[in-house]
Amino acid sequence: MLELQNVSYTVEDEGRPVEILKDVSFKVDDQKFVVITGPNGGGKSTIARLISGVAAPTGGRIIFDGKDVTGLSITDRAKLGIGYALQQPVRFKGIDVKDLLRIAAGHDLTTDEACGYLSRVGLCARDYINREVNASLSGGELKRIEIATLLARKPKLSVFDEPEAGIDLWSFQNLIRVFEIMRSEIEDGSILIISHQERILDIADEIIVVADGQIERQGPKDEIFPHLVGTTSAISGCTRLVERS
Amino acid sequence: MDDIQKRILSEVADLHGVPEGAYNIRVDGGSAGRRSTENIEIIPKPEGSGLDIRIKPGTRRESVHIPVILSKTGMKEVVYNDFYIGEDSDVVIVAGCGIHNCGNQDSQHDGIHRFFVGRGAKMRYVEKHYGEGDGSGKRILNPVTELHLEADSTAELEMVQIRGVDSTERVTTAELAEGARLVVQERLMTHGSQSAVSVYKVDMNGENSTSDVVSRSVARDDSYQKFDALINGNAPCRGHSECDAIIMDRARVLAVPQLDANNIDAALIHEAAIGKIAGDQLIKLMTLGLTEAEAEEQIINGFLK
């Protein structure tokens, strides 16, 4: 499905090169649920940006379904089947939820279809279908709508960048259920999630730990997970609550 | 009417033929059809200089259509329409002007509309402007809208200009008596080397009057827009104006908001935001399979919806 081969990403900061990612290689096989975790600032989000084409690697190759997509645009990768849910969902004045789901699906949607996607992410469809995707929606609502756009898009590979970021704990406990359902329904596609959440890590097939721009560990969940418990790479809901308060 | 005129009629008034209710269709300086109803009387002024439109008190759920079409190059006209809206009525007025100019002379329509909205009456006014034709002659529209709102009356204005008008200077003035309410929604897109100036002057003279003037616009290519809104709070009142513009290419947008509070209980707010399309908006839509140009169109269409 997806393979990163020796991917590096270097930016210039005040004239000096800064390495964000160094020689990162991993695979996401068909029908797998893979979680990338690791400390903040380690380069996880950059991996999602490189896979979706928002940024271009400065070294290495990205292979998707056997094809080298390293030089392809965001649009071309989306058309090949790469879906990307941003960490900070975007707001649009005047575009309503149904518009966004229609764009995601690539064809007109009946109200029933659109409502189906919203119900799956726990939003009462009737209340949201005609709402504008603007500042009147809360972070949790936007996050769910962001996930619903990927459900409507049905990509081969869904990349979620920290679905838990910026939303309250109660909303997230409900969101985890959405990912558990996605996990159980995985058929044609694969899912790659960047997350620190224990419950997300717990349903992974494989876990990749990224720290300091490099892969520190990767392997099956049963092998990696025990090393993470109690670290910032795997935090429980209670820890989050304590940190916030 | 010929096919061009019919098409323009559908652009400016969403009409595909004769509308229901009262109407006057003005084509190239003459009337192409007119109908009064029991409650709405349309009386032409002398020498085709405009119309008096009289709406009886208590008229409810009726509409007036007064579209204007210019299809001859070099046509220039100034038209004076006066609307007398009776007390406690509730009506919709659809105006709008479309210019088709294939020639090399400028075509210009300046519509001067005065509204006298009676006590407790409610009026919704929709005005669409549209231009087309590939001649070198300019398509020019300079509407003046003058509103006199009596006590507890409401005027809701929807002004739309999306395509094809080379130059426009729109002046809207309003005076509000006690409890009167004014709502303006302007939607504007300019392209090429077009210029669009919108001037608003709102006098809230009566206690508990409210006004809300909102402009959303997109300026593309080398076009120029100016939004100049003055809200005067002369009594205990609430006023809000907002200018929200997307700027593209080499366009220029100037927002000149003014609030003038002449009463300790006048609460006035202005918001203005001018900026290009946010990069993350484009990225999000591109991750859904749109090209950059398609993403831009979706964002603009939504913004101006």
Image (cartoon, helix red, strand yellow):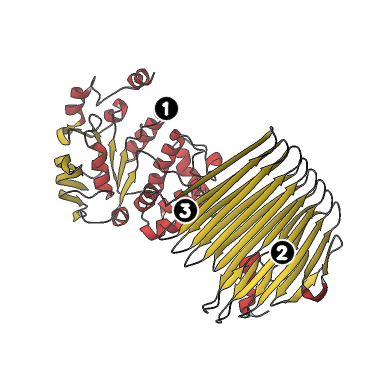
Whole-Å distance between the Cαs marked 3 and 2? 29 Å
Mark 1 Cα within 10 Å, few/some/many (few <14, many 20+)? some
Q: Residue furthest bottom?
A: B103
For the residue pair B249 and B10, the one nearer the viewer reads as: B249
Residue picked out by circle 3? B246
Q: Tell us which disc is closer to us: 3 or 2.
A: 2
Q: Secondary structure at mark 2?
A: strand
- Measured along the vertical axis of the image, is residue A23 above or below residue B43? above
Mark seen at residue B112: 2
- Label 2 marks a residue whose chain is B
Q: Which residue is mark 1?
A: A168
Is residue B301 in view from this perspective?
Answer: no
Q: For the residue labelled by badge 3, is the local secondary structure a helix, a strand or a loop?
A: strand
Q: Amino acid at mark 3?
A: Ile
Q: Nearer the viewer, mark 1 or mark 3?
A: 3
Amino acid identity at mark 1: Asp
Which residue sits at x=54%, y=76%? B133
Location of residue B71 (image quadrant): bottom right
User: Would you say residue A220 is visible in this rendering?
Assistant: yes
